[in-house]
Image (spheres, grey):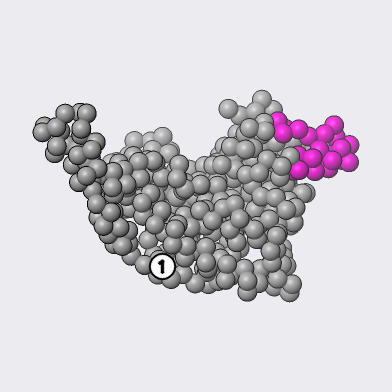
Amino acid sequence: MAPSKPPKAVLFDIGGVCVLSPLEAITTYENENNIPRDWINFAISRSSPDGFWQRLERGEITMDKEFFQGFNADLRNETSWKEFHTSFRNSKKKLKHVANPTQLGDHVSLKAEAADTRPTDQDRGAQSSSGQQLSQSRAQDDDRPSLSKLAKDTTIGDPVSIESEDVAQTTSTKASSTNRHSTVSSSLSPPEATSTLEQLPPVPDIDGESLFWSMMAHSRNPDPYVFPALLRLEKLPPKEKPILAALSNTFIFPPGHPYNRLSDAPESDPRSHFDIFIASAEVGMRKPNADIYKLAVERLDKFDKEKGGNGVKAQDCVFLDDIGENLKTASELGMHTIKVVLGKTWRAVKELEQVTETELMDEKTRRSNL
C-alpha cells in the first residue's frame, strides 16, 4: 500500500538499484567457467556473518592480498560445497530456508536473471498474440536448473532418508509398523552413505580476485531506469524535492584506486546525486542490521531540521532495494519499501512514480517499454 502522502525522503540501495547488479557478473563468470549456477552466491551467503565479503563490507578488513586469499577460501569451502549439493537435490527443507539470502543476493530473486528487461504483454495488460511462443519460452526457462525454481520445490530427504523411504515402502507389506524402522535402519550401511559424499565433484577452482573485480566493473554502469529516475527527483523544485539518500552495503577501495573517485562524467556517478550517502564500510554496519537503518533515519532527521523542516521519521521514508531481507528490516521499522527486481527495474520506477506522485520516465521510454 502506497503512503497517504509523498515521502519526505527516498533511500536507494546502489548495486542492483541505481547501478547494474553484481549478480549479473556472477552469472556471467559461472557460465564462462562452467561453474554450477548459483554456487558463488551460495558460498558467499554461507560464509556469513564473518566471511571475508561481509567483513569487508563492514570495514573491518582492508581490500588487500589477505582479503582475496580469504575470499578465495570462502568460495572453495568444502562444507558449503557439500551443503550446496545436498540442499539442491536431497534436503527436506526448501533451499531458501537453508541458504541465507541476505548476504549478497536474494536467491529467490535470481529467477529474474533470465527475465527480459522489456515488459511482457501481460505486464502491459494487453492480450498477447504470441501466446504459444511465450509458453514455449517459459517452458525453456522452466527447464533451467535455477536456484529460484529449486527454492519453490520441496525436495525429499537427504541421500540416506531417500533410500530409507524406498526400503520402507518395499518392506511395508512384509512387516508391521512396529518393526518397520528397524528393518529400514538395518538395510543401510555406513559405506553407502559415505559413497554418496564421495560422488561429489571437486569444489570449483574460482579466481576470487578476478571475480571480484568483474563484479565491481559491472556495477559501475548506471541502471537504465532507476538512475534516470534519481536524476529527475534531483531536479525537482526545492519544495517538491524529497531528501535523497543512499543506504548501501559497499567497500572502501585501496588508496589511489580509480574507483575511489567519481567517474570522469560526474553526472553518471550515482554518489554525486545524494544529499546523504551511508556506506556500510564507513559506519561499521551492514544491511539487514536494523541499526544501520536507524542511523539513516537519524541523519535524515538532522538534515531536514537543518534545512528548516520538522524532522524525518521512518514512516516518512521510502526505500528501494533488490534484496528481500533488506526490505523486510526497513518495513519492520516503518518504511515504505519497493522491491527492485533484477531485469525488470522499470517496475520499481513505476511504483516510485505512484509513491512520489511524480513522473520519473520520459515519454519515449514510457512508450517504447511500457
**Residue 105 drawn at (x, y percent):** 52, 51
Q: Disc count in the image?
A: 1
Which residue is at 45% across, 41% downward?
97
Tell me the SS state at disc 1. loop
Is residue 128 at all visible to an observer of this figure?
yes
**Residue 325 drawn at (x, y percent):** 56, 42
Which residue is at 30% across, 41% downward?
156
Q: Which residue is at the front of the view, 72 or 111?
A: 72
Residue 58: which quarter of the image?
A: bottom right
The overriding secondary structure of the stretch rendered in magenta is: helix
- Above or below for 272 versus 330: below
**Residue 277 drawn at (x, y percent):** 74, 52
Q: Which residue is at the front of the view, 177 or 288?
A: 177
**Residue 274 drawn at (x, y percent):** 74, 51
Q: Residue furthest top?
A: 4
Which residue is at 28% across, 43% downward?
161
Is residue 366 at all visible to an observer of this figure?
no
Q: Which residue is at the front of the view, 52 or 307?
A: 52
The stretch of residues the image draws in magenta is: 295-316
23 within the magenta span: no
Callout 1 environment at 10 Å: few (<14), some (14 to 19), or many (20+)?
some
Residue 175: which quarter of the image?
A: top left
The reply, left or right, for residue 28 in relation to residue 168 is right
The reply, left or right, for residue 253 in relation to residue 71 is right
296 within the magenta span: yes
Question: Quarter of the image containing the N terminus?
Answer: top right
Under mark 1, the amino acid is Pro
Which residue is at 73% across, 53% downward?
284
- Above or below for 7 versus 274: above
Which residue is under mark 1? 204
